[in-house]
């Protein structure tokens, strides 16, 4: 069964947290420069090591 799509006025903001120097912090508390830096981050998927084969 398909869920009905929400309209924009029915949506609610999602708070994004990230780890900073060993503790977690909401991105919304960052200054404007740090928020921009967070948006530029790239994520990667590490390939399995051949040493364990």
Image (tube, grey):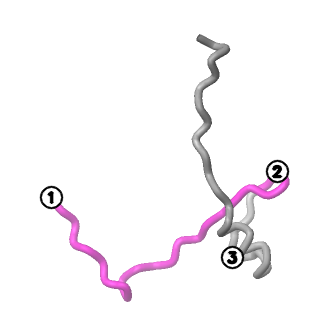
Q: Which range of residues does the magenta coloring cover?
A: 1-23
Residue 31: numbered disc: none
As measured in the structure, the alpha-carbon distance from the residue carrying label 3 to the one carrying label 2 is 18 Å
14 vs 52, left or right, is left
Query: Main structural element of the magenta stretch: helix, strand or loop?
Result: loop
**Considering only vertical position in the picture, is 18 above or below 5?**
above
Q: Which of marks 1 and 3 is nearer the N terminus?
A: 1
As measured in the structure, the alpha-carbon distance from the residue carrying label 2 to the one carrying label 1 is 42 Å
Provide the residue designation for mark 2: 22
Q: Where is residue 30 in the image (x, y as percent from the top left)?
A: 77, 75
16 vs 14, left or right, is right
Q: Which of 20 and 45 is in front in this view?
A: 45
**Considering only vertical position in the picture, is 39 above or below 49?**
below
In the image, what residue occupies the spot 59% across and 70% down? 15
For the C terminus, the quadrant is top right
Q: Position of residue 5 (x, y in %)?
A: 26, 74
Provide the residue designation for mark 3: 28
Please tell me whether residue 21 belongs to the stretch shown in magenta.
yes
């Amino acid at each position: 069964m398909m869920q009905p799509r929400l309209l924009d006025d029915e949506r609610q903001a999602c708070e994004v947290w990230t780890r900073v120097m060993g503790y977690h912090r909401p991105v919304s508390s960052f200054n404007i420069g740090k928020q921009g830096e967070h948006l530029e981050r790239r994520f990667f998927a590490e390939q399995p090591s051949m040493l364990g084969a």
